[in-house]
Image (cartoon, rainbow, N blue to C red):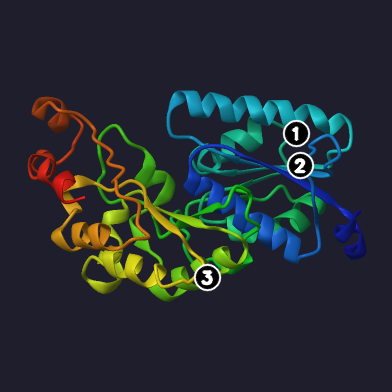
Amino acid sequence: MTLESDFYKKKIGLVSLGCPKNLVDSEVMLGLLRKDGYIITNNEQEANIIIINTCGFINDAKKESVDTILEMAALKKNNCELLIVTGCLAERYNKQIIDEIPEVDAVLGTGHFGMITETIRKAYAAEKPVLWGNPGYCDFNGKERLVSTNNGFAYIKIADGCNNLCTYCVIPSLRGRYKSRSMEVIIEEAKYLVSCGAKELILIAQDTTKYGIDLYDEQKLSALIREISKIEDLEWIRLLYCYPDQINDQLIEEISSNDKVCKYIDIPIQHASDKILKSMGSDVKKYETFKYETFKVL
């Protein structure tokens, strides 16, 4: 049995797989663990606790996640005392993971990564917690993140989840409905990241252009960019995952006139065929309304 005082001597290693949104979740977990007194290590060979933040989007991602779990499971013969699986694969195959891989001591889905410290204590008490079914967790303190991108940039997750319900995509079941974080929370996080040395902030969500619709009943990405750009030591703002149907004149003008915004848009184009788009459950009109003239303004 592990005494309370012993927790603060434990070394924790975390393997983060998948997209930048998952990386933000990993950094939040690391920040919570550091705040609770755990020692963070990059060497899984010396880690007492190993956390794998998994991806479960496509088959290759699932295979990589399972292979990584099995690789880390082998370390339980050495220093590793707890093996914890979090993230999208955990949300999708929660009970199967705990049942089929006996080395796993706890499973946390996408809506429960904020409970990582409590989960470790329960796992040491041999409870084998399995938490899932509340995807789309956005109520985290970004000022407590342990930033792992050491090259002068950092990601900010401005929203999570998706409402599109495309036939080929599992994201809504893994991440829930689209949920924006408040502008105030995001701006405070941006200031914190810049104070940590970030010169470039990359705004991410499943669809950044829909930011704010659920909270403010209107798109707020342009306003958010404008407020973040006021941070003095910030040099660049980059936008990822901008769906074409939500790119409006205000956003184009903000990108064009704001010297801190990188002059390109990352657009997820699904297909060029109307027939294929319909079979995918995608809205054909949103691709028809996107005009190449957009880039002429940028």
**Residue 74's x, y, as percent?**
79, 26
Mark 3 crowd level (few <14, some 14–19, many ≥20, 10 Å Cα): some
Residue 167's disc number: none
Q: First in sequence: mark 2 or mark 3?
A: 2
**Residue 124's x, y, as percent?**
81, 52
The residue at the point 18 percent across, 63 percent down is: 250
Q: First in sequence: mark 1 or mark 3?
A: 1
Query: Does residue 107 appear left or right of residue 36 in this picture?
Result: left
Residue 42's disc number: 2
Foreground residue, 136 or 26? Answer: 26
Instruction: Specify the farthest residue to the front.
Output: 259
Residue 182 seen anywhere in this rendered image of the structure: no
Mark 2 crowd level (few <14, some 14–19, many ≥20, 10 Å Cα): few
Helix, strand or loop under label 1: loop
Residue of label 3: 191
Residue 103's disc number: 1
The answer to which image quadrant residue 6 occupies is bottom right
Please state which amino acid type lies under the numbered disc 1.
Glu
The residue at the point 58 percent across, 30 percent down is: 65
Please state which amino acid type lies under the numbered disc 2.
Asn
Residue 178 seen anywhere in this rendered image of the structure: yes
Query: Contact, CB < 8 Å: mark 1 with mark 2?
Result: no
Please state which amino acid type lies under the numbered disc 3.
Lys
